[in-house]
Amino acid sequence: MSAPRHAGASVFLVEDEVMIRMMVADMLGELGYRIAAEAGDIPEALKLARTTEFDLALLDVNLDGHVITPVAEAIKMRNRPFIFATGYDSSGLPEEFREYPTLQKPFQIDMLAGEIDNVLNAPAAAWLQPWL
């Protein structure tokens, strides 16, 4: 696989299952991305979403039974792009975010690379409205 066009970009990773978070962090590192911060629950993710500098967030939709909506809203307010990761179909996403980029779990490294590349190449204005 060729290096992504945005190698070195920073990623805020939110995933409640430690082993999955470690695996995804390894994938991101292999692709040349750097982890800006990691969180496994809503309160920590919300704090980091508001204070951490990152280029992109990768958000598990369901954190220990809690929907990621407040974290996604905080990231959107900062005009930062994000990708949802979920084991459910789009009906499991918060309604206001169903048009945003989503990776279906389990995903392979090439799927992750492609979605990140798509998102980071999208116009910044795309994050002010639902993803098209």
Image (tube, grey):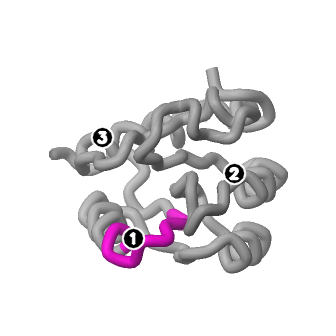
Quarter-of-image position of residue 65: bottom right
**In the image, 125: left or right of 104?**
right
Q: Return the x and y of residue 15 as percentages of the image width and height.
A: 49, 67
Decide which of 47, 118 is in the foreground and name it.
Answer: 47
Secondary structure beneath disc 3?
A: helix
The residue wearing badge 3 is 111
Which of pointers 3 and 2 lies earlier in the amino acid sequence?
2
Residue shown at 46%/47% (left/top)? 86
Identify residue type, mark 2.
Arg
From the viewer's side, name the closer residue of 17 and 75: 17
Residue 47 is left or right of residue 15, and the answer is right
Mark 1 element type = helix
Report helix, strand or loop for mark 2.
loop
Q: Quadrant of the C terminus?
A: top right
Residue at 79% x, 35% y: name it: 128
Q: What is the CA distance from the residue labelled 1 to the residue labelled 2? A: 20 Å
Give the percent coordinates (x, y) of residue 68: 66, 56
Residue 21: mark: 1
Judged left or right of residue 49, residue 14 is left
CA gap between label 3 and label 1 equals: 16 Å
Residue type pointed to by label 1: Arg
Residue corresponding to mark 2 = 80
Residue found at the far right of this picture: 77
Highlighted magenta segment, given as a residue range: 11-21
Depth check, mark 1 against mark 2: the one in front is: 1
> Residue 34: which quarter of the image?
bottom left
Instruction: Tell me which amino acid carries mark 3.
Output: Met
Q: Closer to the N terminus: mark 1 or mark 2? A: 1
